């Protein structure tokens, strides 16, 4: 009786082994997930910045503050949250005078008094993905993000939406516009009601395609990126002309409503 | 009695201090069960365990009989409730915010990524596991009397699971979500007369927009989970009342009803168990075929739960839930695909909207619901495929359907109605397409087998296998072999080109 | 699992122990992680480090009430002080400080409209139900010459940011 009772009261050994193995597996992946969640790219950049800050500190007090700051989330909320830029989580020297000649990602950004950072954020001009906190995602150079970081001269395109008129600081837009007229693009394309109807209306060309690479490729080999297109190739243009044309194309977009709210209030 | 070492005595005292005190007794009523009486008492004095019987038939515990699919579905549902409730704290169902909230979960909310991954993969797993559970119940003939109605509830639960997944699909408000729901809700608009109304009710408008998002959200977080919890309660309760999991009938000598000998002198019976009637069933099993549910059933369930958690957390660790670009109503991806479990329907819709949107789903749902009332003979319960004959018929049904579907698909490519007779009326397209032709062939095939074998069960086995196989093939076609403009591609030619 | 642990073989007991410990980790761990999940890392309530205008914009003796940021900035002879505009009683926003320009802090008065607590220019409670005075914040100057109020750092009301 006691014997049969004992057999009856124990589950087969295999189930005990399965329990131990699966529990261990579940616990392992839980701990791995905790580590993965903690071990974020931006922590490394903040650590490096702290070290640089410490090295550049002039006084004992500055050294203490440099060491005291821990890993932290930081963001610039533009226009009540329509745009949120977390670039400063890695680009920590943006406003720090001591980092004037530092290399990216810690380089100081020249101050633009008419566009204070805390009101305009970063992506308004630089594009990219403001909410992201990994390098690739933030620079928008990933699948499923349409606005990659604008590098070099392409950044001038961002002036276009709000400052549609002449802008001395954005010469590439002017040059692109001129090339657009000189090369007869007007014959097929329409911008703000003026031009032909063979090709698509380009009034908001910069909203349809936000990647400079696409535009350059499209000017060189239209059919490659837009199958069936009737557009002739513009391979004869110099690379810098193609770049200017691209900047002009990218500048053709509506001003984001966030910008209107971020603009300095008239006193 | 072996004498204990002082260390053992200390341990025993510590354990008993922890497990056998006033508070524990007030919750569990008894200490840790160490005899069969207490093991039985644990089962019916615990709220969460009392849905299980005190003793379980050994047949119900065979892993190769149930594959644990029902209990896995339940545990996936529990995981989904937990992760879903947490995700709700960081999600606002607004077209202006939903996508940003997804990004915040990904980038700045602690454990946001892992919770979303768990929720997403558990949802896909549940769609698959519930379906496999239905196949298990069908192939073991467990829908037969007295379990007909529980089968119907199961079919409803399967539908609710699909709706849960479908409504959740929209919430991230990315391109994947937006266009899958646009395509999926359009499939629902094809039934004549009521189709457009169904779609309007579903979306709260003509297109997928803010109204659709809030409707899908409310359905996803309140209405459908509520319905499912009630249906699951009934489903589990009916398992008990219908005599536990199905199993082969015991040898006749033991089942003779009304004879005193059939009652075991080793058991005690409540009055209700002695009353005349079909349920509850007390005399169909001998005591030696049973084990105590505590610990045998409970521990196995625990292991399955831990297994579900282990597999899900591993998958969630290695694979991130997809999130595409922000939904853009002006720019559909090409091809725009429905969620994977509706791709079979979408493939048939590409032949004929009426066939894929109405005839096939209606045939499937009506067919599934009426199986237990058509195939009524009690033959073959509790054994996979009923018999060797059933096994052969199932195998051959699957093998025959594969070439038939492929040939029909090829024929449709080259000799479809509109290719033979350009400008043919839509009625002819709706009547003569792979979807409707297959349904006719399936009906004929299963009726032939029913006549030939004289067994409705064999006919049902053939019919279910036909549907199952063809739907799997069409899903695979929709998933891997359809590219831009729904044209044929090879899986490796698939591109992200929108 | 069995009636009592004593009936287990050592091997079973070891495996069960490992299983239960891991099980507890994988059960209690997520509970703690989920509590952490509920504490937000970012909020959209405005920043805690407030950057105001440049130092010269504030006239000596002026008291600036920032309605949207819920702080009060005192420009005094030798520097700045800043306090919260949120009443410590039940978090209503107090009225702006009143008093002639250049008045000494103890002449100034601010009143909470909800339950009538009154404060002087040092944040001290003069009357009403407020349990303590107004919090004062650390004021600094940014590298580009602007007033910065760090609402995360609470200081004594007397602490000046000296220019």
Image (cartoon, rainbow, N blue to C red):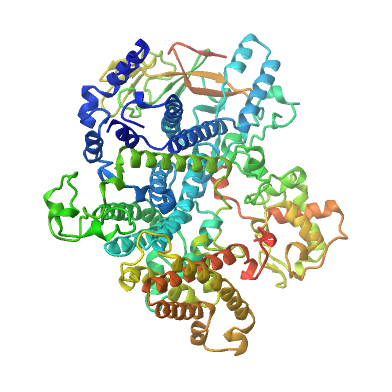
- Looking at the picture, how far across and down is residue B363, in whole percent? 41, 74
Most foreground residue, C91 or A73? A73
The vertical placement of A219 against A50, above or below, is below
Residue C131 lies in what quarter of the image?
Answer: top left
Most foreground residue, B265 or B296? B265
Point 44% across, 72% down: residue:
B463
Query: Is residue B211 visible to the viewer in this orientation of the structure?
Result: no
How many marks the image carries: the answer is: 0
Most foreground residue, B275 or B157? B275
Query: Is residue B371 visible to the viewer in this orientation of the structure?
Result: yes
Point 11% across, 50% down: residue:
B271
- Looking at the picture, how far across and down is residue A78, in whole percent? 54, 40
- Looking at the picture, how far across and down is residue B152, in whole percent? 32, 64
The vertical placement of B30 against A256, above or below, is above
Most foreground residue, B193 or A260? B193
Point 32% across, 26% down: residue:
C4
**In this rendering, would B348 be left or right of B85?**
right
- Looking at the picture, how far across and down is residue B72, in whole percent? 41, 48
Q: On the rendered image, what quadrant is the C terminus of chain B found in?
A: bottom right
Residue B412 lies in what quarter of the image?
Answer: bottom right
Q: On the rendered image, what quadrant is the N terminus of chain B found in?
A: top left
**In this rendering, would B145 be left or right of A121?**
left
Residue A119 lies in what quarter of the image?
Answer: top right
**In this rendering, would A193 be left or right of B3?**
right
The vertical placement of B68 against B446, above or below, is above
């Amino acid at each position: 009786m006691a014997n049969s009772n004992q057999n009856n009261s124990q589950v087969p050994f295999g189930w005990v082994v399965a329990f131990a193995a699966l529990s261990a597996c579940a616990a392992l992946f839980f701990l791995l997930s905790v580590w993965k969640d903690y071990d974020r790219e931006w922590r490394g950049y903040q650590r490096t910045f702290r070290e640089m800050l410490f090295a550049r500190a002039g006084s004992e007090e500055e050294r203490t503050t440099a060491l005291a700051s821990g890993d932290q989330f930081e963001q610039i909320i533009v226009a009540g949250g329509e745009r949120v830029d977390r670039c400063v989580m890695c680009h920590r020297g943006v406003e720090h005078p001591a980092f004037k000649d530092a290399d990216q990602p810690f380089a100081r950004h020249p101050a633009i008094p008419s566009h204070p950072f805390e009101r305009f954020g970063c992506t308004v001009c630089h594009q990219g993905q403001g909410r992201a906190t990994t390098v690739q995602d933030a620079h928008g150079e990933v699948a499923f993000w349409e606005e990659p970081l604008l590098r070099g001269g392409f950044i001038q395109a961002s002036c276009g939406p709000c400052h549609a008129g002449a802008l001395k600081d954005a010469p590439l837009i002017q040059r692109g516009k001129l090339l657009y007229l000189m090369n007869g693009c007007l014959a097929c394309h329409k911008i703000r009601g003026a031009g032909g109807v063979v090709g698509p209306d380009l009034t908001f060309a910069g909203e349809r395609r936000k990647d400079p690479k696409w535009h350059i490729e499209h000017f060189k080999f239209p059919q490659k990126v837009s199958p069936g297109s009737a557009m002739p190739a513009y391979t004869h243009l110099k690379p810098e002309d193609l770049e200017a044309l691209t900047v002009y194309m990218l500048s053709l977009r509506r001003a984001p409503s966030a910008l209107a709210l971020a603009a300095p209030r008239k006193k | 009695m072996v004498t204990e070492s002082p260390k053992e005595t200390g341990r025993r005292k510590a354990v008993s201090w922890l497990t056998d005190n006033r508070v524990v007794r007030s919750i569990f009523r008894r200490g840790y069960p160490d005899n069969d009486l207490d093991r039985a008492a644990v089962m019916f004095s615990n709220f969460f365990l009392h849905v299980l019987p005190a003793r379980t038939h050994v047949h119900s515990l065979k892993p190769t009989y149930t594959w644990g699919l029902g209990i896995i579905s339940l545990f996936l549902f529990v995981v989904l409730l937990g992760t879903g409730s947490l995700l709700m704290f960081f999600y606002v169902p607004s077209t202006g915010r939903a996508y940003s909230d997804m990004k915040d979960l990904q980038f700045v909310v602690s454990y946001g990524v892992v919770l979303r991954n768990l929720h997403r993969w558990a949802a896909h797993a549940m769609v698959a596991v519930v379906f496999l559970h239905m196949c298990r119940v069908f192939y073991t003939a467990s829908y037969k009397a007295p379990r007909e109605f529980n089968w119907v509830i199961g079919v409803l639960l399967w539908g609710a699971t699909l709706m849960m997944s479908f409504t959740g699909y929209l919430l991230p408000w990315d391109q994947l979500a937006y266009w899958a729901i646009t395509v999926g809700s359009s499939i629902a608009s094809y039934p004549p007369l009521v189709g457009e109304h169904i779609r309007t009710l579903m979306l709260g408008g003509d297109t997928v927009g803010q109204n659709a998002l809030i409707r899908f959200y409310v359905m996803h977080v309140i209405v459908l989970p509520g319905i499912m919890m009630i249906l699951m309660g009934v489903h589990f309760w009916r398992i008990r009342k219908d005599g536990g999991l199905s199993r082969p009938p015991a040898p006749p000598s033991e089942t003779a009803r009304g004879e005193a000998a059939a009652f075991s002198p080793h058991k005690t019976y409540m009055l209700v168990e002695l009353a005349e009637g079909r349920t509850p069933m007390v005399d169909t099993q001998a005591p030696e075929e049973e084990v105590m549910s505590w610990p045998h059933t409970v521990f196995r369930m625990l292991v399955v739960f831990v297994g579900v958690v282990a597999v899900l957390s591993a998958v969630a660790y290695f694979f991130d839930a997809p999130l595409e670009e922000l939904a853009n109503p002006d720019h559909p991806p090409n091809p725009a695909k429905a969620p994977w479990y509706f791709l079979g329907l979408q493939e048939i819709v590409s032949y004929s909207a009426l066939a894929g949107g109405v005839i096939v789903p209606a045939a499937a749902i009506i067919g599934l619901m009426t199986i237990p009332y058509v195939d009524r003979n009690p033959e073959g319960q509790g054994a996979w495929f009923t018999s060797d004959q059933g096994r052969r018929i199932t195998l051959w049904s699957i093998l025959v359907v594969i070439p038939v579907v492929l040939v029909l698909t090829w024929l449709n490519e080259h000799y479809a109605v509109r290719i033979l007779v350009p400008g043919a009326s839509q009625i002819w397209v709706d009547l003569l397409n792979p979807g409707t032709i297959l349904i006719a062939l399936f009906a004929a095939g299963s009726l032939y087998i029913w006549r030939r074998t004289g067994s409705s069960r064999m006919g049902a086995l053939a019919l279910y296998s036909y549907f199952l196989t063809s739907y799997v093939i069409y899903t695979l076609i929709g998933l891997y072999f359809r590219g831009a403009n729904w044209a044929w591609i090879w899986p490796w030619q698939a591109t992200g080109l929108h | 699992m069995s009636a009592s642990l004593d009936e287990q073989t050592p091997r079973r007991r070891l495996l069960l122990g490992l299983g239960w410990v891991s099980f507890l980790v994988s059960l209690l761990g997520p509970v703690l992680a989920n509590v952490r999940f509920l504490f937000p890392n970012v909020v959209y309530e405005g920043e805690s480090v407030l950057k105001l205008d440049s130092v010269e914009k504030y006239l000596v003796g002026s008291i600036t009430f920032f309605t949207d940021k819920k702080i009060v900035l005192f420009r005094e002879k030798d520097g700045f002080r800043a306090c919260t505009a949120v009443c410590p009683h039940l978090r209503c926003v107090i009225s702006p400080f009143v008093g002639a320009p250049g008045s000494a802090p103890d002449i100034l008065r601010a009143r909470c409209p909800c339950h009538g607590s009154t404060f002087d220019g040092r944040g001290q409670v003069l009357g009403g139900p407020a349990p303590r005075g107004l919090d004062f914040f650390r004021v600094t100057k940014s590298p580009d010459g602007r007033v910065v109020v760090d609402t995360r750092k609470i200081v004594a009301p007397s602490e000046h940011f000296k220019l």
